[in-house]
């Protein structure tokens, strides 16, 4: 009886101890300054064993994270991933390439790539729960390229001077973007801040500077400007800001092909967008069946060199409590079977000080003008004070 009474607890302790040992992550340090290789280390690991890899020094190598689950790459202060002089070896490669992986956390690295060869960070082939934190990325064709139905969270990432875009998201991928900054130092090259095809981005607290197009979404893509605070609940500015100090911007945001731009929990500020010749340059351009919706007061466009909000080619915009002021051309512009509705909100929409505040062609309509403050100027025969014609 005594052996039986003591045997059961001992067996339970052994089982629990084995379970704890299996779930505790393996911890490894890679010091590239001592000739160690991050990529060789990863190639020797069991990709299904949770592992924390601490990185020190400058690692001049292409790094592949393929088929991993529960991997952490943690950079020590000054840890850098540098593109080597050798070729990438694959059209799908990146300086840091994450493929077919789940629950991968990359934190605290500087990543430096050229602007013509490969993305600095590539995430593809159905990877999910990929978290990029506190990265400082210089160059790359894309600073970050996400493709083939991936799920990625990006926070506290700085990306500067890519060949084309700091962030490309494609192929039904879903991205949460917060507290980041994407910058072109000169604004001279054609660059797009967020380039999104057939995918979804939820974003807040991010600044995009000196890009020819701040955000470009096409092929049914959805851009949600929303304060979701999923990972960080501490106070932080939630605004999304698109700045144009270099004066080379064409559009703050363009949405086409049935996509949508929605501002429902964080403000979108667009400062001095567009070009002085006007045309279709300016703050927000929605076209080809796209839409714009917003909650009260979440859009501010100031000093546009081009237009303010444009709805073209069978598209529709709804603005509530928006501010569109001091533009060199149109404030609200609807053309080619499109419409703009100024909806009722807790505050009136301010459209004023533009060359012409309200403009539409003969096939388009602007409704809800009773919800505008002041006396906006108009070149539009299809203006309705209410949001609809008189209904039966």
Image: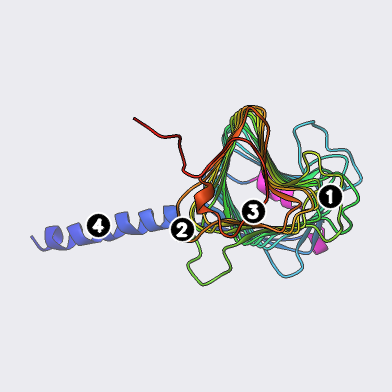
Q: CA distance from mark 3 to mark 1?
A: 49 Å
Q: CA distance from mark 4 to mark 2?
A: 18 Å
Disc 1 crowd rating (10 Å Cα; few below 14, some 14-19, many 20+) is: many
Could you say which disc has been placed on residue 24 in the image?
2
* First in sequence: mark 4 vs mark 3: 4
Q: Is residue 336 above or below residue 310?
A: above
* First in sequence: mark 2 vs mark 3: 2
Could you say which disc has been placed on residue 179 in the image?
none
Q: Position of residue 47 (x, y in %)?
A: 57, 43
| 163 magenta-colored | no
| Tag 4–tag 3 contact (CB < 8 Å) | no
- Residue at x-position 77% and y-position 48%: 329
Q: CA distance from mark 4 to mark 1?
A: 52 Å
* Secondary structure under the numbered disc 3 in the rendered image: loop
Instruction: Determine whether, in the image, residue 228 is placed left or right of residue 183.
Output: left
* Secondary structure under the numbered disc 1 in the rendered image: loop
Label 1, on which residue? Answer: 113
Q: Position of residue 336 (x, y in %)?
A: 67, 28
Label 3, on which residue? Answer: 376
The mark closer to the camera, 4 or 3, is 3
* Secondary structure under the numbered disc 2 in the rendered image: loop
Q: CA distance from mark 2 to mark 3?
A: 65 Å
Looking at this view, is 6 or 285 the one in front? Answer: 285
Instruction: Determine whether, in the image, residue 392 is placed left or right of residue 285.
Output: left
Q: Position of residue 344 (x, y in %)?
A: 45, 51
The mark closer to the camera, 2 or 3, is 3
Residue 35, by quadrant, is bottom right
Could you say which disc has been placed on residue 12 in the image?
4
* Secondary structure under the numbered disc 4 in the rendered image: helix
């Amino acid at each position: 009886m005594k052996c039986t009474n003591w045997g059961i607890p001992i067996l339970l302790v052994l089982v629990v101890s084995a379970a704890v040992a299996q779930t505790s992550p393996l911890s490894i340090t890679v010091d590239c300054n001592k000739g160690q290789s991050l990529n060789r280390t990863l190639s020797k690991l069991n990709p299904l064993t949770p592992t924390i890899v601490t990185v020190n020094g400058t690692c001049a190598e292409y790094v592949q994270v393929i088929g991993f689950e529960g991997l952490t790459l943690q950079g020590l202060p000054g840890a850098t991933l540098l593109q080597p002089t050798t070729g990438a070896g694959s059209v799908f490669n990146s300086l840091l390439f994450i493929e077919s992986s789940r629950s991968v956390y990359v934190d605290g690295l500087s990543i430096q790539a050229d602007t013509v060869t490969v993305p600095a960070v590539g995430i593809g082939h159905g990877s999910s729960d990929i978290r990029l934190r506190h990265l400082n990325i210089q160059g790359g064709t894309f600073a970050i390229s996400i493709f083939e139905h991936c799920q990625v969270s990006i926070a506290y990432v700085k990306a500067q001077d890519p060949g084309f875009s700091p962030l490309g998201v494609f192929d039904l991928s879903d991205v949460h973007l917060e507290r980041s900054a994407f910058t072109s130092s000169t604004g001279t090259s054609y660059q797009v801040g967020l380039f999104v095809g057939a995918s979804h981005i939820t974003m807040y607290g991010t600044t995009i500077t000196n890009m020819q197009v701040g955000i470009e979404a096409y092929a049914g893509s959805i851009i949600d400007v929303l304060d979701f605070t999923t990972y960080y609940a501490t106070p932080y500015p939630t605004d999304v800001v698109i700045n144009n100090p270099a004066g080379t911007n064409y559009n703050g945001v363009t949405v086409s092909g049935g996509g949508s731009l929605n501002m429902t929990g964080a403000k979108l500020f667009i400062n001095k967008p567009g070009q002085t010749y006007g045309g279709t340059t300016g703050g927000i351009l929605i076209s080809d069946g796209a839409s714009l919706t917003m909650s009260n007061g979440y859009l501010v466009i100031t000093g546009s060199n081009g237009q303010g909000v444009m709805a073209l080619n069978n598209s529709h915009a709804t603005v509530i409590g928006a501010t569109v002021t001091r533009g060199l051309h149109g404030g609200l512009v609807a053309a080619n079977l499109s419409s703009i509705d100024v909806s009722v909100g807790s505050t009136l929409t301010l459209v004023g000080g533009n060359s012409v505040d309200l403009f539409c062609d003969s096939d388009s309509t602007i409704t809800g003008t009773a919800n505008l403050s002041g006396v906006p100027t108009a070149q539009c025969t299809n203006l309705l004070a209410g949001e609809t014609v008189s209904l039966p």
